Image (cartoon, rainbow, N blue to C red):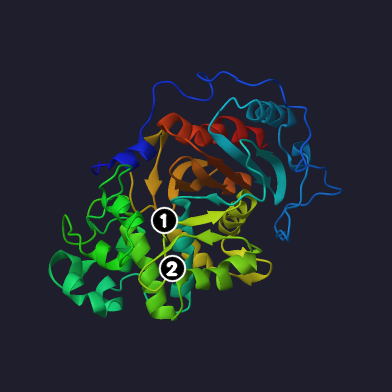
Amino acid sequence: MARLTARVRLLLASVSCVVGMGCATPTATDASSTPTRWEITAATSVDDGASYWPAAQWRTALPRQVGMDSAALATLSHDVRLRRWSTLRSLLVVRHGYLAFNEYVAGVEPESLQKIQEVTTTATGLLVGMAIDRGKFRLDDGIALFFPEYANLLTFGPKSGIRVDDFLTMRSELDFYDEPYDGSPLQELNTHSGDWLRLIFSHGTHTSGAGPWRFNSGGIIALGGVLRAVLGEPADSFARRTLFQPLGIDRTSWFIGAPNGLPHMAAGLSLTSPDMARIGYLLLRDGRWNGAQIVSTDWIARMRERRSQNLGKWLTYPVEYGRTLWILPPVAGADVVAASGVYGQWIFVVPGKDLVVVATSNARNVGDFALPIQLLYDVIIPAAR
């Protein structure tokens, strides 16, 4: 197994006590019957969701109307509202295009913009695929091609062999590791007022090209520079025009740096939980949205390819990596894929059950971070008949 950084160990480590199921104790009075203004309402009729796309709001249905175990989800709702898992902030379940579970706690509401951390990386993967679909560049193109202004940093030695695909698959070996403590390259960038790209490219490498897997935010941020170089506009502008607006996402926030207003493409995006579900629904529907192919089916398949295996486990679940997507154990004959961010931000896509699940959290330990995976596999997926 590749050497894991502390941040990635937070993502991959398993724990002996499964926090949130056997270890947690409710800490609040029973509020499970208290209505909220975002309460799920019954659908007047239901369909299979194959031709449904959410407008300003998601449509809703009672769990039983979309083939889900009402009792299991009622218990889950009860536990969420009791704050049984104190770091969980929102949990949404979309089945056949119907929002069937919709809970918010800790002051979070459907309209709340939340920093989605490294879930941003998956959005970047979609944007890169859209540019590739438009013929702007190729996966095998060398990174140095796009940055003549940094030729002295990129055209000599091992860095001269780094390709676009190496950044997407986290196999570039660029020594810009992610660590959750002061002094790491990522922490330095997050507080850096100068040129982010020069800072990233100034770091060395471990080997020459396509090396062992290692989560690397620097490479993903650099892809924002690639997008600007080939598109002639900032990556966040391209995202707003070609991805977010077609999906009906009109409220976003993106941490911006230099040069030229470069967005933090690895962890700087904020979205609402319902809009995170739209990203998941685009992945579930193979890049299609309301009659348009927003991202090619071929690119979605490339994102789901197993590029790195045997990376470790989240709790008891083996984890692999594609192109800006995590790959979890299959369900009903199809891989489960996930976008994941530190502190417990998740978009799960379960094609075998026609499910999208979103969770946001404020986790500070491995068990709380990985709790949504356990809820997915132990509660939500079994409830989907």
Residue 376's spot in the image, x, y percent? 56, 36
Residue in the image at 28% along x and 71% along y: 143
Return the residue at label 1: 324
- Residue 315 seen from this side: no
Question: At label 2, which amino acid type do we have?
Answer: Val
> Seen in the image, is 10 located left or right of residue 108?
left
- Vertical arrangement, residue 36 with respect to residue 200, above or below: above
- Vertical arrangement, residue 165 with respect to residue 316, above or below: below
Image marks 2 and 1: residues in contact by CB distance under 8 Å: yes
Taking the view exactly as shown, the residue that stands out farthest to the left is 157
Residue in the image at 16% along x and 54% along y: 206
Chain-order first, disc 2 or disc 1: 2
Return the residue at label 2: 128
Residue in the image at 54% along x and 60% along y: 253
Question: At label 1, which amino acid type do we have?
Answer: Thr
Residue 27's spot in the image, x, y percent? 60, 20
SS type, badge 2: helix
Which quadrant is the C terminus positioned in?
A: top right
Q: CA distance from mark 2 to mark 1?
A: 10 Å
